[in-house]
Amino acid sequence: MNDAADATGAERSLTVLADPTRVRILGLIRDADGGRELVGRLADELGVSQPTVSHHMRALLEEGVVRREPDGRRAWYSIDPASSERVEAVLGRPVAPAVPPDLARISGDLALRFRGVFSKETVAHYVDDSYRLLASTGPGSRLASRTAAFSASRLEALGRERGTGAATPEVLFVCVENAGRSQMAAAILHQLAGDRVVVRTAGSEPAGEVRSTVVAALDEIGVPLGGEFPKPLTDEAVKAADVVITMGCGDACPVFPGRRYLDWELDDPAGRPLEAVRPIRDDIESRVRGLLDELHIS
């Protein structure tokens, strides 16, 4: 009787872990900072509703796969240590911790790229500061390559501010997390204008990754996101821009003379399913096309 009960329990456990959404939830929990996550953050990352995530969490909780830790009005979920082996059997081995970025090598490469424009000391300062800013938003992925890309973007913006860049119009899109609206606007503008416009994005409180629903919504209309990722808002990005377009980030964006500032009132795609993100994408595309007309780029 006990053997039969154990077999039935094992089969039920395998069924619970067979659901692809639950597998993704467990992967996000395992890889989260501290090994725990909130339902709201999981919903945002997955692009589904909170009730949907709660439904899956109840099933995992009932089977002892996760455990719940109340924290005031919210609750954190983590993988139950007693179930860690079977969870790892489903997820596979976690990715090994990344080697710390070789900031000296990144600085050396960028010093060569910006030779005659900035000193090695200036380049090294921006590399160190860019790494600090990106690391402060969370462990993230590809931190070394992102540090190099963010540093290069900041140095290019600084060069433009100092008059060493090309006279190409520059647009900066800013939202809160730089994971939704600003990324869609930048990707669409780049797709429509190509190299005729310099496009940058930033967030007042950048997230770790661009939302999967945003990537999907852009892909549907043939707009690639490329290697873009959420970036912190910096003064040099604002100073280099001809047009600064904010989207729901309030007064977080610094104001400098000589720049044109616009505020686009747009719904936030955070936590919305793909079908709700599409109208936001289309609204943004309409506004971007209007902006191109204003910039006399067609």
Image: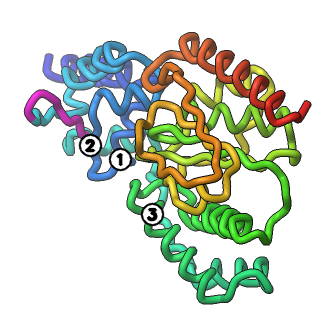
How many neighbours does mark 1 have within 10 angstroms: few (below 14), some (14-19), or many (20 or more)? some
Q: In the shown orientation, is residue 28 left or right of residue 285?
A: left
Q: In the shown orientation, is residue 259 left or right of residue 53?
A: right
Tell me the amino acid under the disc marked 2: Arg
Q: Do the residues under discs 3 and 1 have CB atoms within 8 angstroms?
A: no
Q: Where does residue 57 sit, x and y in percent of width and height?
A: 27, 23
Q: Is residue 262 above or below residue 164?
A: above
Instruction: Please name the residue that numbered disc 3 is placed on.
Output: 133
Tell me the amino acid under the disc marked 1: Ala
Q: Mark 3 or mark 1, which has the lower sequence index?
A: 1
Q: Is residue 264 above or below residue 251?
A: above
Q: Mark 3 or mark 2, which has the lower sequence index?
A: 2
Q: Which residue reaches farthest right? A: 298
Task: Give the structural element (helix, strand or loop) at label 1.
Answer: loop
Report the front residue among 43 and 272: 272
In space, the residues marked 3 and 1 are separated at their CA atoms by: 19 Å
Instruction: Please name the residue that numbered disc 1 is placed on.
Output: 32
Specify the quadrant that holds the N terminus.
top left
Q: Which residues are magenta?
A: 72-78
Instruction: Please name the residue that numbered disc 2 is placed on.
Output: 36
In space, the residues marked 2 and 1 are separated at their CA atoms by: 6 Å
Q: Where does residue 229 sit, x and y in percent of width and height?
A: 59, 48
**Residue at the (88%, 45%) spot, across then down:** 196
**Residue at the (67%, 58%) spot, across then down:** 240
How many neighbours does mark 3 have within 10 angstroms: few (below 14), some (14-19), or many (20 or more)? some
Q: Where does residue 153 sit, x and y in percent of width and height?
A: 67, 62
Q: Nearer the viewer, mark 3 or mark 2?
A: 3
Task: Give the structural element (helix, strand or loop) at label 2.
Answer: strand
Tell me the amino acid under the disc marked 3: Leu
Q: Is residue 135 magenta?
A: no
Q: Is residue 193 above or below residue 204?
A: above
